[in-house]
Every structure is written in structure tokens, then in C-alpha cells.
Image (cartoon, rainbow, N blue to C red):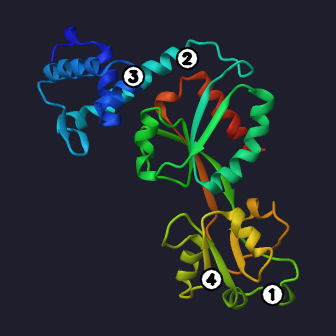
């Protein structure tokens, strides 16, 4: 492959096809015609002396050569974008930037109520969008700029990802006011005698509380599984069910709060971003603002 024959636009097409796995969708994303995408792909194939993408029933599947260069192409495009953004004067009062966050509903409940008042006062035209990206897909989404930030539990170390501890919080048990269990000592036996609500987006699996109980060779009776803490708290407020949740969140509800009578590791959330965004002044303002919010 001769560097003299390289056209940087070709690598943008490559990155988009790799992401979309569909030439028509890649053309829409790039706002060009499909023949233009096909022409660029033909030039890329000649440049790399490889098919790069094979048409299958599941879309355009990358060859081993395409897989091998995809990360470097995405990272290089990100660095170019970051260099351009770095040269722009950033004014939070004027910016119309849109930031994409990956967060679970629990992370949203912990982060957004504190972050949005700051955004309203300091960056009134800035937009946030939050949705959940699976952990195994986060690094790729951050590298491609599809996600700007992720608020997640500690992930496996990745040299391309930067992170900063954001939230550490204890788990507590909440009950409705007037619950019979409030009249006696809240021991492990008393906890196990209760029927519990478990919050998870997964159909099966154990949370931190259940893993801690497993170490004690006991288990609790889970009467109900739901997806959201807000729903669980509303149910607990009108029944004799119990709910274990982070203290930070529990304090928002009119419920009795009890320390758990057995050791449970703290909930830890980190803020993650891709190294290529370090030089983006708007990105820097957002992450530094968010970190400061949770340091005070």
C-alpha cells in the first residue's frame, strides 16, 4: 500500500462501513450516494489488496484484514477530530454540543439530578442524551465517538480508556414507615425473614447483596424482580416488602433506612472516556465539571 495514494476520505468511508455493516446505511450516515460508497470501497480494496468486506445475509462482514486495521483507523479519525475541536474556542454559554452518555437507570438516577442544574445554568444550549450500551461494546463505541462518556462500575483495564472514580456509596435496606420489622433489632436473621424486591434489567443473576449473602452461605427470599428502583421504592412504600439499594438513592424516598446487618462491598461508579477525546476542550469541560460535582 502506497501512502502517496491515500485519500483520508476513504478511511472515513471504511470506518462507517465497518460500523454500519451496510452500504446503503453507510451512504445515509455519510450523506453521500451509495455508488460513491461502492466506488470508495473499490478503491480501498485496491489500496489494501484485500476484499475488506464480504456481502453476506448478515450484511457486509469484515475480513481479518479489515478487523486488524479497524481500531487504528477509528483512533486516527478520532485524533483528527480532537485536534480540530481543540483549536476551537469553547464557550459553555454558547455551545450547542450534544453529548452521548452510556448509563444504567441507576447511574442516571445518581448522576443526572445533580448534573442537569449545572447544565441549565452554565451551558443552557448543551444537550445530553443517555442510553445504555452493553459493557462489552463500550470500548468500541467510545473509540468511534458514538458515546462520549460512560458511567459504569469498574471495567477491565483498557489502555485506550481513561477513567475517574465518580461515586462510592453504601447499600442499605429500606422499608415502609410502620413496618413490623422496625420494632426489633435489625439482624441478619431479621433481614432474611423479610421478602425482598430485587432490581435488575437481567432476567436472572445475582446482585452485590446476593453475592455477599452467598459468602455467608445464606440467601434471601426474592418475591419480586423489577427493572427500576423508582418502581421498587413505590412498591415497598405500600407493602411489607424490603428493598436493598444505594444510600444516595434511598434518601430521596420517604422510606425507613436501615444499615445492612452484614458486609457488602460499596457501589462504585467510574466516569469513562476515550483517550482520543482528551484534547477536546468541550469534552474536557464536561468531564471536569462532572468530577467536581461529585467531589463536593
Point out which mark residue 121 bears.
none
Q: Earlier in the sequence, mark 2 or mark 4?
A: 2
Tell me the residue that label 3 is attached to.
30
Front-most of 289 and 295? 289
Distance between the Cα atoms at labels 4 and 3?
50 Å
Front-most of 279 and 231? 231
Front-most of 54 and 91? 54
Circle nearer the viewer, 1 or 2: 1
Q: Earlier in the sequence, mark 1 or mark 3?
A: 3
Point out which mark residue 181 bears.
1
Circle nearer the viewer, 1 or 4: 4
Dot 2 lies on which element? helix
Question: Quick check: marks 1 and 3 in contact, CB under 8 Å?
Answer: no
Q: Earlier in the sequence, mark 2 or mark 3?
A: 3
Distance between the Cα atoms at labels 1 and 3?
61 Å
Question: Quick check: marks 2 and 4 in contact, CB under 8 Å?
Answer: no
Residue at 40% x, 40% y is 140
Q: Position of residue 158 (x, y in %)?
A: 42, 44
Instruction: Using residue 169 as the reference point, say whether residue 181 is left or right of it.
Output: right
Tell me the residue that label 2 is attached to.
86
Q: Quarter of the image holding residue 121? A: top right
Distance between the Cα atoms at labels 1 and 2?
58 Å
Dot 1 lies on which element? helix
Residue at 67% x, 33% y is 288
Q: Earlier in the sequence, mark 4 or mark 3?
A: 3
Distance between the Cα atoms at labels 2 and 4?
53 Å
Question: Quick check: marks 4 and 3 in contact, CB under 8 Å?
Answer: no
Which quarter shows the N terminus?
A: top left
Q: Position of residue 243 (x, y in %)?
A: 70, 74
Amino acid at each position: 500500500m502506497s501512502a502517496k495514494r491515500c485519500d483520508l476520505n476513504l478511511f472515513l468511508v471504511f470506518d462507517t462501513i465497518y460500523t454500519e455493516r451496510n452500504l446503503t446505511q453507510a451512504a445515509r450516515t455519510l450523506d453521500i450516494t451509495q455508488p460513491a460508497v461502492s466506488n470508495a470501497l473499490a478503491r480501498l480494496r485496491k489500496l489494501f489488496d484485500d476484499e475488506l468486506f464480504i456481502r453476506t445475509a448478515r450484511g457486509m462482514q469484515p475480513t481479518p484484514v479489515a478487523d486488524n486495521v479497524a481500531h487504528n483507523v477509528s483512533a486516527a479519525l478520532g485524533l483528527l477530530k480532537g485536534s480540530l475541536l481543540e483549536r476551537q474556542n469553547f464557550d459553555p454559554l454558547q455551545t450547542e454540543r450534544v453529548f452521548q452518555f452510556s448509563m444504567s437507570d441507576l447511574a442516571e438516577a445518581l448522576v443526572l439530578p445533580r448534573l442537569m442544574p449545572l447544565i441549565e445554568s452554565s451551558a443552557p444550549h448543551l444537550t445530553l442524551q443517555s442510553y445504555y450500551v452493553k459493557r462489552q461494546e463500550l470500548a468500541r463505541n467510545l473509540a468511534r465517538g458514538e458515546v462520549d462518556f460512560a458511567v459504569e462500575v469498574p471495567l477491565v483495564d483498557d489502555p485506550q480508556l481513561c477513567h475517574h472514580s465518580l461515586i462510592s456509596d453504601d447499600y442499605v435496606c429500606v422499608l415502609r414507615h410502620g413496618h413490623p420489622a422496625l420494632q426489633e433489632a435489625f439482624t441478619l436473621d431479621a433481614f432474611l425473614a423479610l421478602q425482598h424486591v430485587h432490581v435488575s434489567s437481567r432476567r436472572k443473576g445475582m446482585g452485590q447483596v446476593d453475592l455477599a449473602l452467598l459468602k455467608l452461605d445464606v440467601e434471601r427470599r426474592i418475591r419480586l424482580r423489577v427493572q427500576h428502583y423508582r418502581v421498587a421504592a413505590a412498591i415497598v412504600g405500600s407493602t411489607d416488602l424490603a428493598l436493598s439499594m444505594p444510600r444516595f438513592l434511598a434518601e430521596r424516598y420517604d422510606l425507613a433506612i436501615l444499615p445492612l446487618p452484614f458486609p457488602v462491598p460499596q457501589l462504585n461508579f467510574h466516569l469513562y472516556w476515550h483517550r482520543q477525546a482528551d484534547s477536546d476542550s468541550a469534552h474536557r469541560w464536561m468531564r471536569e465539571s462532572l468530577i467536581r460535582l461529585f467531589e463536593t
